[in-house]
Image (cartoon, helix red, strand yellow):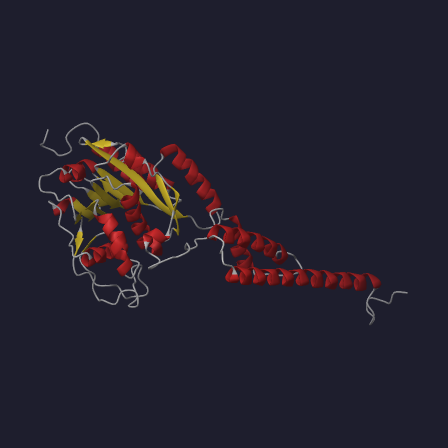
């Protein structure tokens, strides 16, 4: 006979429920311990094996193990902190796999050959040997910037009689929508065939990696180009003026780097700054002379030299200054452009005449780029009195 709920003995239904709960917990906790033991055995076997599996095989084993672990952890009787569950979900959902260094990694994290291209247009420079290759580092999700560039300064493959190709460099997307963004990128590349993607995480702190991967792509996929330019995605580029500059007599065809030059720039040590660099990464108080990262131009013999010399240069997160350090280690110096006034940073007011004369300006939005370009290219002389 059941006792009252208020008495010392629990009702029969509660006793049975409690026993079942304990059995379930014991069961799946034991199962989890077995999984962990299997994992340890796998690691031990891998360590002792004469023929170690590839990173791909390891990752497949890792996925399988983590999937079973996640099933246990998601069981309502085995609570896991939400942030840990979230990280497991990201690992399982990322089809490209985690950013793992390949076997035999050498030198340092910004050494470009440590990474590989997961999306490529490696024949683009074989079909049309470019006089100028424009490489644009851009965030994976920033479709608006890419489309604006395609509509404006990248809308022609021949400029002033010279072949010009524009390609966009991306890393891996992050966040909850990473899988969706990756699929969108694949479709975008099928349509435009101008995306290059490598297996590093696309973050601000990885800009040096991104830049060196650009250099590696130029050295291995596009060595036939005469010149190349790394140009940011928020730039107005007067492509005609750029090509005209390169066609001038006396412009070097080797060991040439030019743009908006920065001399004796102090290293930012404030931890609150976006450009903070700790002394452990870069001990000197000033940077070597470098070209501002908004857009710098170079002869295409340099990328392979940058990649090679980077073996000897400890990476730091200011990518344009890092290229300046590569130049210094090579015993070279950036050169002022024929007309330094053509490489400009900010202009607070659009002026059609002004924009007809410059090569670069930083803009506030992709909409500005389309607006300014459309106005610049409309019929009629851009400067008053020059009709």
x, y percentage for residue 345?
21, 48
Q: Residue at x 83, y 70 (%)?
A: 9
Q: Residue at x 26, y 63 (%)?
A: 268
**Which residue is most to the bottom?**
8
Quarter that holds the N terminus: bottom right
Is residue 234 among the parts visible in the rendering?
Answer: no
**Which residue is most to the right?**
1
How many labels, in total?
0
x, y percentage for residue 315?
30, 60
> Height in image: 195 above or below 56?
above
40 and 36: which is toward the camera: 40
Q: Residue at x 83, y 64 (%)?
A: 11
> Height in image: 334 above or below 247?
below
Q: Residue at x 52, y 62 (%)?
A: 48
x, y percentage for residue 76?
66, 57
148 and 162: which is toward the camera: 162
Is residue 10 among the parts visible in the rendering?
Answer: yes
x, y percentage for residue 239?
21, 37
**Which residue is most to the front?**
50
339 sits left or right of 43 in the view? left
327 sits left or right of 86 in the view? left
33 and 345: which is toward the camera: 33
Quarter residue 288 falls in: bottom left
Quarter that holds the C terminus: top left
């Amino acid at each position: 006979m059941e006792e009252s709920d208020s008495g010392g003995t629990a009702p029969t239904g509660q006793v049975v429920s409690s026993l079942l709960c304990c059995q379930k917990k014991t069961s799946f906790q034991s199962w989890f311990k077995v999984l962990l033991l299997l994992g340890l055995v796998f690691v031990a076997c891998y360590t002792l094996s004469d023929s170690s599996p590839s990173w791909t095989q390891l990752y497949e084993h890792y996925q399988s193990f983590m999937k079973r672990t996640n099933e246990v952890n998601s069981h309502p009787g085995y609570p896991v902190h939400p942030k840990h569950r979230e990280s497991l979900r990201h690992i399982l959902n990322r089809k490209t796999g985690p950013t793992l260094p390949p076997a035999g990694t050498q030198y340092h994290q910004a050494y470009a050959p440590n990474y590989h291209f997961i999306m490529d247009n490696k024949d683009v420079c074989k079909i049309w040997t470019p006089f100028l290759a424009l490489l644009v580092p851009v965030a994976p999700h920033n479709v608006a910037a890419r489309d604006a560039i395609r509509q404006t300064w990248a809308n022609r493959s021949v400029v002033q009689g010279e072949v010009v190709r524009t390609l966009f460099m991306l890393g891996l997307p992050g966040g909850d929508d990473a899988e969706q963004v990756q699929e969108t990128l694949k479709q975008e590349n099928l349509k435009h065939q101008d995306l290059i993607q490598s297996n590093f995480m696309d973050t601000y702190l990885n800009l040096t990696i991104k830049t060196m991967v650009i250099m590696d792509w130029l050295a291995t996929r596009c060595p036939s180009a005469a010149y190349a330019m790394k140009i940011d995605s928020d730039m107005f580029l007067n492509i005609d003026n750029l090509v005209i500059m390169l066609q001038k007599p006396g412009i070097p065809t080797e060991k040439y780097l030019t743009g908006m030059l920065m001399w004796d720039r102090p290293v930012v040590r404030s931890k609150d700054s976006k450009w903070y660099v700790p002394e452990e990464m870069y001990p000197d108080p000033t940077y070597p002379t470098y070209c501002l990262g908004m857009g710098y131009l170079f002869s295409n013999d340099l990328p392979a030299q940058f990649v090679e010399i980077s073996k000897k240069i400890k990476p730091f997160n200011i990518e344009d200054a890092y290229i300046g350090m590569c130049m210094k280690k090579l015993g070279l110096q950036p050169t002022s452009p024929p007309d330094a006034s053509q490489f400009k940073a900010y202009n607070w007011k659009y002026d059609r005449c002004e924009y007809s004369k410059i090569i670069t300006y930083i803009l506030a939005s992709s909409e500005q780029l389309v607006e300014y370009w459309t106005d610049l290219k409309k019929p009629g002389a851009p400067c008053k009195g020059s009709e």
